[in-house]
Amino acid sequence: MRRFGVAVAFALLVVTGGGRAASPGQPERVLVGYGEGRSASSMALERRLGLNPVARITQLRIDVLAVDRDRVSVVLDALRRNRDVRWAKPDRRVRALRVPNDPFWPSQWSPRRTHAPAAWERTVGDAQTVVGVLDTGIDATGPNLRGRVVPGFDFVHGDPDPRDDNGHGTAVAGVVAAAGNNGVGVAGYCWRCRLMPLKVLGADGIGLSSDLARGIVWATDNGARVINASLEGPADDLAVAAAAAYARAHGVLIVAAAGNDGSSTLGYPAALPGVVSVAASTAGDDLYAFSNSGAALAAPGENSTTSLGGGYERFLGTSSAAPVVSGIAGLLLGLVPNATPAQLREALERSAVPLNGVVYGRVDAERALNALSPPLPSSSPPGGHPSRTTKRALRGRLGPHGQRLVIVTGPGFLRVRFEVRGKGSPKVGVAVRHDGRRLASRTGRRLVRLRVPVRGGRYRIVLAGPPGRPFRLLLAYPRPL
């Protein structure tokens, strides 16, 4: 069986080689991709070959089957001759590579370098934004992650308990969404985002590409808006590629580590179409020598983050850089919840600070938010004293369910101006919600204005109109005290 060495891309030292060798006769797995349907002959063939079903990725029409190791070649040849089979391949190994972590907690230069504090002035994320972490699981017992993890799944052991028995996934999770401004430990990038643990790598850091594909599909079907894959492999895999395309088609952004080989060739899934690939940059805005180049973006490759047992650690590598981008994507969704993966990618790429070795540059949280939703300059009253009013402008296209965004205000009045562009005078509407209830709403033709008294806090603006139509939204509201 060919082995697929997937490095959980966070180590400076790269250990080469495949997974653990299987003894003769030990069951292995093969993946079979079917067309629109399977005939009775293909099912009969599976039975004749003595193949035992392990899992089925129904959404992708892929079966995962167990076979004796010494029969893999014969079985694959027989499957490929069947008219219902599009392809049949061995289930490749995925591998985590790790170096010891220094037992100290350095200053967090990463958020400052990416201007995260300025971004946090506009949003710290939203609890409805879920980031799927495809990794070794998550230990949610520490104070920075407790209560922030939604149900996930353990594809290694086949149960709904994706606890971390390695540490890598917990480190990734902390970079994405460790609670901030709570006086404890470290601050992640998206303070209010939720984390979905998808365990696709075991305690030894080894997994299978079929579990990786299943994890992507499971996260997509269960509400993740962003998927972080801090792992990489040397070759394309049809099941993982199909899963990535499935996620993209269902409105999910995938962020993947570029790899730690010091190579100019991206690993997978970072090299797949539509996946945001991330290299690791230094505090001086250069790429680390170990980082693969050619990625779309770079992000700080050294972060202080959470570790097993509620502790903290220094986390270095492209596995540390990718969750920086995932966390910033979470902030973008906190500001514009209906943003599409294409809009998120465009905002991240267009706002990046130029850096040698990557296509667009080093990610910047503040600039990315401004690229997605430009704030209007605040006015100053006579006498030069700064206004207590925040003004924001948002342009885009309405999605299938309109558009939603969240703001944080002080006491006073919220003013909304919503206009749909294009031909005709379609019916449009605006609603303002707070604490789960509707405060005010208004409908009109093409243009709606609304003025609502607010007490301060988090308010949700809901826009309705014809899907796909371009719109412009102007907001003015008191700054939070």
Image (cartoon, rainbow, N blue to C red):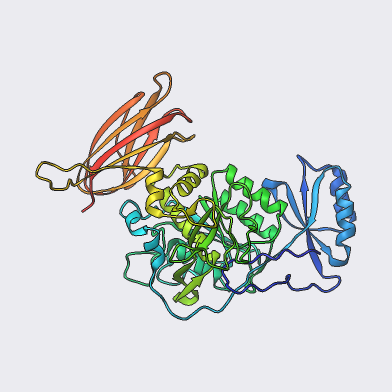
Q: Residue at x 45, y 57 (%)?
A: 327
Percent across and percent down for residue 108 are: 39, 69
Q: Nearer the viewer, residue 298 or 264?
A: 264
Q: Is residue 361 left or right of residue 389?
A: right
Q: Nearer the viewer, residue 286 or 455?
A: 286
Q: Residue furthest front?
A: 356
| 56 vs 469: above or below | below
Q: Residue furthest top?
A: 424
Q: Residue at x 65, y 59 (%)?
A: 267
Percent across and percent down for residue 69 are: 84, 66
Q: Residue at x 36, y 32 (%)?
A: 472
Percent across and percent down for residue 176 are: 46, 61
Q: Is residue 415 left or right of residue 48?
A: left
Q: Nearer the viewer, residue 88 or 470?
A: 470
Q: Is residue 126 left or right of residue 272?
A: left
Can the viewer see residue 436? Answer: yes
Q: Residue at x 80, y 52 (%)?
A: 88
Q: Is residue 468 left or right of residue 80?
A: left
Q: Quadrant of the N terminus?
A: bottom right
